[in-house]
Each structure stands twice: as C-alpha cells, then as structure tokens.
C-alpha cells in the first residue's frame, strides 16, 4: 500500500479534516478539508505537513450523472458561470467506486476501482492506476473525497440489496 487515510468528515467546524499519510514513514502527504458552506459538496486539498493548497474538488451542480470537478489553485477564479473550466473531471460509477479521472483535453489520466477481494466495514481497498506525470497524491485525495461523499449512500444501497436477497423486497 502507498498511503493510509486517517480521520473522517464529521460535518462540524474544524473537524472536517482527513489526513492522507505515507505508509512507509507516516508522513502526511495531503489533507482534505471539507467546506461547510458550499452549494455542492466541496473539499479543499492541501499538500501534507501544512503545505500549500493544491486545489479543490466539488460535485457538479447540474449534470445528468454524478460528476466531480477538480480545480487547481491559481487556475483562474470566478464564480458560477464565470468560473474557470476545471483542470480535471471525475466520471463513472461512484456507488461501486469505479471511475476515471480525465484532464481538460478529455484524456484519461487515472483509473480507480474498488478491490473486491478484501473488504471490511471499517476500511476499503482500492486499485489506482495513474498516468505518467500525473500527481498520484491528487488522485488519491479525489478518491478519498468521493469515498466519503458516497459512503452513506453506498451503505443504504447495500442494505437494500441485502433485504431483497433475503426476501425482504416489495412483496414479502
């Protein structure tokens, strides 16, 4: 494993931080900080150890399917329709944690898939493929934000499937 994630988003002021740590030496490589006041779920991404802000991840407000946009710090400001285009877009099946990250040209720069072999309620395993030259820490930070965002939704879906498998469907 490359990194270990510590912390959880509690949706309380000052408590919505998640630390991404190097498995080898325990050093912090990135920090996710959820914005409490935002139109859509938004996470700031910082380099570890109190480093500079890399950018932010936000769920797309208007879209036919769930998408997340990644904006890089210094990539131009703006608000609403005047906002600069995102540097990256995350698309795919977020409930099953299988998605791709594309750059502004539409090229796939990373693929993420939940590892189905080893799963526990308290932690998850993922396979992450990153293109040469792409920031792996940024990709993992995006994965953590999406995992946190869809964790509750995924639990509800899993419970529903379990009930249906046990015969607890609509007509039982």
Image: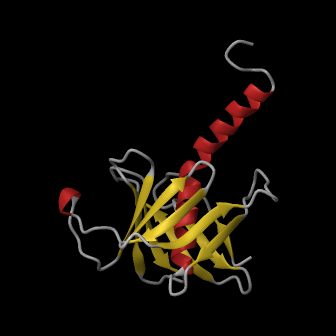
Image quadrant holding the C terminus, namely: top right
Image quadrant holding the N terminus, namely: bottom right
Q: Nearer the viewer, residue 77 or 166?
A: 166
Q: Which residue: 56% across, 49% down?
A: 150
Q: Tell me if residue 49 comes above or below residue 128 in the rendering.
A: below
Count of picture labels: 0
In this rendering, position of residue 135 left or right of residue 113: left
In this rendering, position of residue 116 left or right of residue 144: right
Q: Tell me if residue 56 comes above or below residue 41 in the rendering.
A: below
The spot of residue 18 in percent (x, y) is 57, 66
The spot of residue 16 in percent (x, y) is 51, 59
Quarter of the figure with residue 112: bottom right
Residue sitting farthest toward the top: 171
Quarter of the figure with residue 155: top right
Q: Tell me if residue 39 comes above or below residue 158 in the rendering.
A: below
Q: Tell me if residue 8 comes above or below residue 159 in the rendering.
A: below
Q: Nearer the viewer, residue 43 or 49?
A: 43
Q: Which residue: 62% across, 74% down?
A: 129
Residue 98 in view of the camera: yes
Q: Which residue: 43% across, 54% down?
A: 67
* Scheme of image coloration: secondary structure
Residue 9 in view of the camera: no
Q: Which residue: 36% across, 73% down?
A: 105
The spot of residue 141 in percent (x, y) is 54, 70
The spot of residue 164 in percent (x, y) is 73, 26
């Amino acid at each position: 494993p490359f990194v270990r994630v510590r912390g959880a988003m509690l949706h309380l002021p000052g408590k919505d931080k998640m630390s991404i740590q190097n498995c080898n030496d325990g050093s912090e490589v990135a920090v996710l900080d959820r914005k409490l006041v935002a139109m859509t779920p938004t996470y700031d991404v910082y380099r570890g150890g109190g480093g500079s802000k890399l950018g932010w991840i936000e769920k797309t407000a208007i879209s036919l399917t769930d998408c997340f946009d990644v904006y890089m710090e210094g990539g131009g400001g703006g608000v609403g329709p005047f906002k600069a285009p995102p540097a990256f877009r995350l698309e795919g099946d977020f409930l099953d944690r299988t998605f791709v990250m594309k750059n502004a040209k539409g090229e796939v720069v990373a693929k993420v898939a939940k590892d189905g072999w080893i799963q526990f309620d308290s932690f998850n395993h993922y396979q992450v493929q990153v293109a040469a030259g792409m920031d792996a820490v940024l990709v993992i930070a995006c994965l953590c934000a999406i995992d946190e965002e869809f964790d509750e939704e995924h639990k509800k879906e899993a419970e529903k499937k379990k009930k249906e498998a046990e015969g607890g469907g609509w007509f039982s």
